[in-house]
Amino acid sequence: MREISGAMRGEWKDETGDAMAPTPGLVLEGVSHLFGAFKVVDDVHLTVASGEVMCLLGPSGCGKTTTLRIAAGLEHPTAGRVSVGGAVVADRSTNIPPERRRLGFLFQDYALFPHLTVADNVAFGLAGWPAAERGARVAEVLEQVGMKPYAHSYPHMLSGGQQQRVALARALAPKPRLMLLDEPFSGLDTRLRDQVRDQTLHVLKGSGVATLMVTHDPEEAMFMADRIAVMRNGRIVQVGRPVDLYCHPVDAFVTSFFGYVNRLEGMVSEGGVETPFGRLDARNLPDGSAVEILIRPEALHLRPSDEDARFAAQVVTSRMLGRTSLVHLCVGDVASHHVHLHSRMPGRFLPSEGEIMEVVLDRSQVFVFPSEGTN
Amino acid sequence: MAGWTIPIVVVAAFVATPVLVVAAHMFMPAGEVWAHLAATVLPRYVANSLWLMLGVGAGTLVIGVGTAWLVTMCRFPGDRLFEWALLLPLAVPAYVIAYTYTGLLDYSGPVQSFLREFFGWASARDYWFPETRSLGGAVTMFTLTLYPYVYMLSRAAFLEQSVCVLEASRTLGCGPWKSFRSVAMPLARPAIAAGLALALMETLNDFGTVHFFAVDTFTTGIYRTWLGLNEPGVAAQLGAVLMLFILALVTLERWSRGRGRVHHTTSRYRRLPRFRLSGMRATLAVLACLAPLTCGFLLPAAVLGKWAFESAQTSADTRFWQLMANSFTLATTAAVVAVAVALMLAYGQRLNATRANAAAVRIASLGYAVPGSVIAVGTLVPLAWLDNTVDSVMRDVFGVATGLLLTGSLVALVYAYLVRFLAISLNTVEASLSKITAGMEGAARTLGHGTFSTLRRVHIPIMRGSILTAALLVFVDVMKELPATLIMRPFNFDTLAIRAFEMASDERLADAALPALTIVLVGVLPVVLLSKAIARSRPGEEP
């Protein structure tokens, strides 16, 4: 667990990568990739330590899958250097093919071989092993993922979740230095997904392998990852522990990627910006610049209004969403035009339409960034 | 991975050479012989070819589209049986059916003999009977054996049509006939054009029928110029003109596909609502399907069977087994080579999908559109040059005459088959390869297997069925092939097709029956495969 805790320290940016564990599972340095004239991956720096689970998170088309395929050797980067287990596998002059990189790849569609049994699928990567060891290893990993009873079944006889576990076992069997997972849970239905996610996380953590996983689902990333790298337009925007990204996002994109946010516009004056719920600090932004104010719905705490309420809002409607309740609010702001906001309250909280509520702002969940147009 | 580009381009160039050699002859200076041909026989070749195409085009369209519409859209007794049985004439090469009908309908054949006896006619002057060995006869033979191409593709197109479109047409007040004319036909037009193009290419490719019927076309002209006049260059020039016809067909097919982009807006399939026919209509539908099936397969096969049985004493001798052995060896070799090359091209292109590779693979599969006689010429011209060069070099340097090493060898023949039939194996292999996901390939690679090991342990086992199908298709086509075999075979090397051709040319039709029947029986195999594929391709309908 030593490496993991090392990784858990979490850093905002991986500038050198060497500062992490002694032999990182994967190091990407200045990796770029062009498809024609289009830069899919743009100067990516990333380090995944042994035993660490790193998630590449981003919207579709942000280059995260290409980054993963570059790590695997299924694509050759246009520029930059890739190292696996401390050895350079791709740079300007090197291009080690995937079969010699000693890594495991879990594909989105699992890519099980339909003509082989579960056991033969798992044994596929153990071609050079002595027969006895091979058999033992197959049994061991199948046991690990709980698929031993199905060793002689064929892939089409298995459910989606079972196929996923076989694919995981197959990728882990040759004891790879690095595991690469491409949206491994997207083929499963929601109910099954949570369970399979949990099992996968424990199997990966148990094997102590460095893991890079691609996903577009922030909740999944936060569940699986020790650290998350958020990607956008081919670039890594921010790297850090889930809590860092959620509580200290570097820009509006990262903030809104982790869930719905209320967006307000404002102007900086004298190191601050006015909102319907009070003045916010904006000392690091120049006076007179346009800013975006992002307020998470859970930052707007509501309570019954009394005489000396400083900030109030009118309830438009309220809905029970399960564990939380969503309240639609209307605020007449300073310039006296109406702003529509969402507040999320724990449990059952259903004020009636038209009711005036007092709003208390949780400032740790409010972020001020320069407007997208100006940066 | 880049290691695959060079072999792909080399193989593609190798396969494309004969076609390019013939095409190059288009620009060769026309010699005296050419001038003579152009003045005497060329107009006849062109006229005959055009009449053949016109007749066969009309005939295959009517029979092919008509029967396809009946079996897909109507319910009548035996419709499921006809669905695949209508493909059976595909098993019969046109020259085989030509020999059969000639034997059946000639002056001395059973039909005319019966008529004479029945009506008491004494000689041919007493009555009129259509001449089998004529342009019209050739058109009939081709129509009967080639309509399945149009049938197969238009049927597939009708099946693919969304029920919703047809139902919309019905609710808008169009009856079944109007729906057919104004909705189904226009939607199926590209597929029908493709089937028609295939049928016409086969018509132009034919040598056996037109030679037997003495309808002079380019293929007989090439044969005569090459072997009679000993003018390979002129033969190649004739081949080049023939290729212009093929090019026109291909262009026409592309054009009909491109105009007014036909595609289906919905992908919702439901049980095709078939029009239930009964009484008189059902009888007519059965007859309409039974007629081409009977004339194109049942009757000729029965007649051949009778003749073969009667002549078995004399023709099923050791020589016949030798013919079988020759045909099977040749066809098996060609099938193995064609599948191996197809696998290499398709897999290599998949690993390394550059534009150059894609172009190389497409060029390599051009041969299927090119008639066998043209390919024979295109193969022999460069091989003869190679042989002569090697011979003269060896003579100059070592004082040894090597003679003709490749020309007239089995290697050259297999090479010609590869050029002609590679497209068949390539299409089958490519279709099957596309079903293996990129993930499976990636999984095998990341699990430590290189490209060859992945091909051997993942692709080939998964594609086994399709690889066998591809091999079978090439095998059967080689068994049937006549013109290239006739021109290129080694001296005294006979196959079943050659034997049938020679016996028929000597007016010994009964002796041609056994080899011809064997070819037909082998030809039924891919039809069985096709019918299985058809049974599976019934979207929205319960099996």
Image (cartoon, coloured by chain):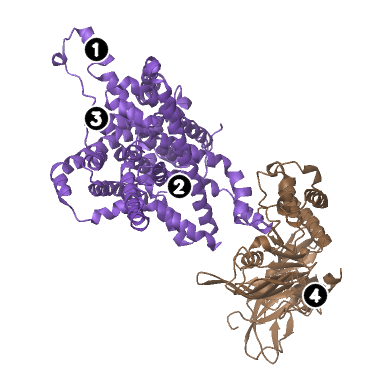
Q: In 3D space, how far apart are the residues under numbered discs 3 and 4 (Cα atoms)?
A: 86 Å
CB within 8 Å, label 3 to label 4: no
Provide the residue designation for mark 4.
A22
Q: Secondary structure at mark 1?
A: helix
Q: Count the marks.
A: 4
Structural distance between the alpha carbons of marks 1 and 2: 56 Å
Work out whether B196 lies above or below B6.
Answer: above
From the viewer's perspective, tell me whether residue B291 is left or right of residue A237: left
The location of residue A308, given as percent across then percent down, is 81, 80
Colour in which the image shows chain B: purple
Q: What is the chain identity of the residue bearing mark 2?
A: B
- Density class for disc 1 (Cα within 10 Å; few <14, some 14-19, many ≥20) is some
**The quarter of the displayed image where residue A367 is located:** bottom right
Identify the image quadrant of residue A374: bottom right
- State the quadrant of the N terminus of chain B: bottom right
Q: Residue at x 27, y 27 (%)?
A: B505
Which residue is identified by label 1?
B113
| Disc 2: which residue | B264
Q: Chain of mark 1?
A: B
Q: Secondary structure at mark 4?
A: loop
Give the Cα separation between the discs numbered 4 and 2.
Answer: 59 Å
